[in-house]
Image (cartoon, rainbow, N blue to C red):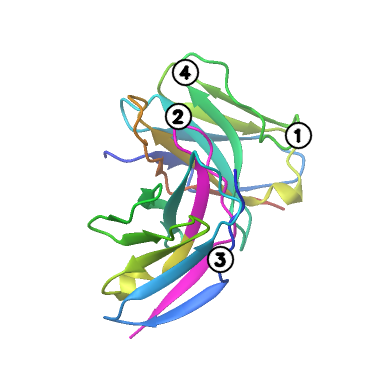
Amino acid sequence: DAKTTQPTSMDCAEGRAANLPCNHSTISGNEYVYWYRQIHSQGPQYIIHGLKNNETNEMASLIITEDRKSSTLILPHATLRDTAVYYCIVRAHFGNEKLTFGTGTRLTIIP
Amino acid sequence: GAGVSQSPSNKVTEKGKDVELRCDPISGHTALYWYRQRLGQGLEFLIYFQGNSAPDKSGLPSDRFSAERTGESVSTLTIQRTQQEDSAVYLCASSFSGGRSYNEQFFGPGTRLTVL
């Protein structure tokens, strides 16, 4: 699986958009970008994934650069409940294989 | 409940003792994973079960660690002769296997293991 690089921590004001970057310069053609988050004392939770097109669901949007070497997870209107560690993971799509988690970005939403 | 459940939620044991951790996956999920998370760190993959296939044990850190799964239901992770470095939160996840779309992993709340 390709390696990802994320900032260690970020703050965002409540109600504003939170933009979490991820670098994955060694991503290969068959690898997707996945985002999970882990709220304190809970197991990780799936957020979104994508290959090359931008994706949006009820939780977030995922913007992937044209060269696919980086991406941004956007929480459009952050709330205090979005405070969590956010993990960007790159891996091949198919199958039910292990996820390789880095240390992620600790996002703190400020009231 | 409909989610992944794990027991116990907390376990304190003495060094050298054996411990057994349990995971109940979501009904109908054929894939089951165990991960370990040390304090302040990301998750480390331990083992993966998929249906009747041989499990992927590539993440088990030593032969003191083993896991079993009964059919497509309960799984137990056993740690023999526990060491202090085994202290961590042990997380179980399950996912549905079907088609060629991505099947997200659903995680349980974890078991916090403390080895004294």
Residue type at the position of mark 3: Gln
- Both labels 4 and 2 in a single chain: no
To which chain does the residue with label 1 belong? B
The foreground one among A77 and B92 is A77
* Residue drawn at x 51%, y 51% as measured from the top left: A89
Q: Is residue B46 magenta?
A: no
- Farthest residue in the left direction? A58
C-beta proximity under 8 Å, tags 4 and 3? no
Q: CA distance from mark 3 to mark 2?
A: 25 Å
Residue depicted at 49% across the width and 77% down the height = A10
Near mark 1 (Cα within 10 A), the count class, few <14, some 14-19 or many ≥20, is: few
Q: Residue at x 75, y 50 (%)?
A: B84
Residue wearing tag 3: A6
Per the image, the residue denoted by label 2 is A95
Q: Give me the chain letter of mark 3.
A: A
User: Residue at label 1?
Assistant: B62
The residue range painted magenta reads A87-111
Q: CA distance from mark 4 to mark 3?
A: 38 Å
Q: Are marks 3 and 2 on the same chain?
A: yes
